[in-house]
Amino acid sequence: MKTIDELNLPADIRYTDDHEWAKPTGDTVLVGVSDFAQDQMGDIVFIELPAIGATFTKGDEFGTLESVKAVSELYLPMSGEVVAINTALIDTPELINQQPYECWLVEIKPSDPGEYGQLLDLAAYLRLLRG
Amino acid sequence: MTTPLKTTPLHAWHVGRGAKMAAFGGYEMPLWYPAGAKAEHLAPITAAGLFDTSHMAVLSLRGPAVRPLLQRCFSKDLERCIGVGKTLLTPGRCVYGVLLDHDGQVLDDAIVYQCGAHDYLLVVNAAMGEPIAAHLQQQNKKNPGALIDDHTDAIGKIDLQGPAAAKILARILRDPDQVFDKMVYFSFKGTFAPQFLPGAPVTLLDGTPVLVSRTGYTGEFGFELFVDHKDTVRLWRMLLEAGAPEGLLPCGLAARDSLRAGAGLPLSHQDIGPWPFARNPWLFALPWDEDGKGFTKEFIGNRAVLAARSTPCTLAFAGFDPRKIAAGAASQVTALDSTPLGGVLTCTTDMAIDRVGSVVVSIATPVAGGRPESFTPRGLCCGFVRLDTPLPPGAEVLLTDGKRTLKVEIRDQIRPDRSARAPLAAMLAA
């Protein structure tokens, strides 16, 4: 298990209390899980993602990650419509353990881009991790 | 106030190597190391894995009254339990069985080792040393003479499991040819405490005494090794160094649990427990007579077990992909039409298997046995369910935990082509 100092935590993205990350790319936002989340879960062996076109409110469950020991629900950091899912992960979910920030799970078109500013920046996320 | 967790002699090693730690049986134990639970599940099937099992409890039972005591408290008939010929337990052999109460309910499962004419070891589960010793003492009052001691805190136990286990162990034993000679499944040699526990000496290259047992809890070929507490870390390091060429991996409890579930082995207090030991896949632990209708001896719980005809039925299952549900009180098994059938005892993922058509294939299955040349299993959910009425192999049921519902198939076997019973000589030659 990684110590907090060993975690890879980019400063150019934002985080949630549930350890998802969000990264704006033009009009859309990519969503994934943090290095802390994948390290806690252990080997990810299965992934369930929503259909393209599904709409969610911030905080809604949008899918699951299945590790060897448990099922973890995924919660959307921002309200919006799913415009793409990372289908490459369906056959190789273990990539999420290796590259948690390259492995975006869904791409959403946010209904309120202002919600991004309410997410945790790196300093706030580190405070959360350090308890 | 919570009781502080106990630790094994290897605790600092686990933490130092970045293991994810968790509480189990009153101990803080490694769930997995940085290699991850999937690699740790595969290693004992393809090469070898190393498990710290020092949390398990070890009792010694000494004196002429022990055999009658075990005959009364342990489910196997020690006079008729070895091999197809059902010969008696003798020094150097060990047997698996259960300890029941008068209602036929499981106190714990155990392996009994006969070390000398009147000297035995009883290996039970973590945190069970004290209650099982107390139960045996209570029974001992009726026919005193058994000396019962708990050695759990004085010894270390390491399981070396996998097809490469004998090759690796041979490199650190002083006389491997002598140790491995006629070492059949469920036999052992040596002792971890020569001063009070008899046994022909088996030593490591550096002279450390060790008890080598050809047993395990993975379904794969291998050994359980018992040493004095102070020798545990040294043995662990010696094995890791000796096993480096084969890729020996330290493995945590997650892999231990998924390996044993795929092998169809029960976890005590989860798959067997406070209900009658009947209508389950492990009835070989009972002392059946020749016609399979009665028992060859009287023991605590025997009548209740024979009378338990309507107790729920425990069955193994495998799913169709790696997805699991959370087993336990909130889980339910239903028929495909949602009729309630029972509950889920164990639900985990065996990462070494997948379905090829309707057949379950393992990474250990030979190509001639049906494994495709390029086979990268995604894993299958598997475990045990407890149903009100029996279902035949092949029957399909639904598992639900309130969040998700999975279809699974009732099966006799889960992971095929396991190596546990492979002849030792063949494993050394491979």
Image (cartoon, coloured by chain):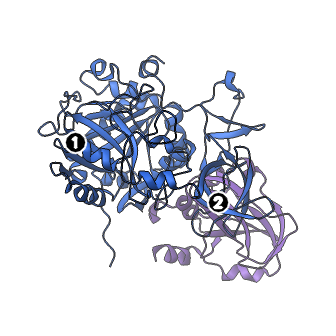
Chain colours: A purple, B blue
> Measured from the top left, where is residue B38 in percent x and y?
56, 46
Residue at 30% from the left image edge and 69% from the top image edge: B4
Q: Is residue B267 visible?
A: no
- Amino acid type, label 1: Asp
> Measured from the top left, where is residue B373 in percent x and y?
71, 26
Is residue B134 left or right of A88 when viewed as pictured?
A: left
Residue at 63% from the left image edge and 29% from the top image edge: B365
Q: Chain of mark 1?
A: B
Q: Chain of mark 2?
A: B
- Amino acid type, label 2: Asp
Residue at 50% from the left image edge and 44% from the top image edge: B283
> Measured from the top left, where is residue B189 in percent x and y?
27, 29
Quadrant in which the N terminus of chain B is drawn = bottom left
Q: Name the quadrant containing residue A115.
A: bottom right
Q: Name the quadrant containing residue B214.
A: top left
Residue matched to label 1 = B231
Q: Identify the mark nearer the N-term, 1 or 2.
A: 1
Depicted B180 relative to depicted B249: above or below: above
Gap between marks 1 and 2 measured at Cα: 48 Å
Q: Secondary structure at mark 2?
A: loop
Residue matched to label 2 = B388
| CB within 8 Å, label 1 to label 2 | no
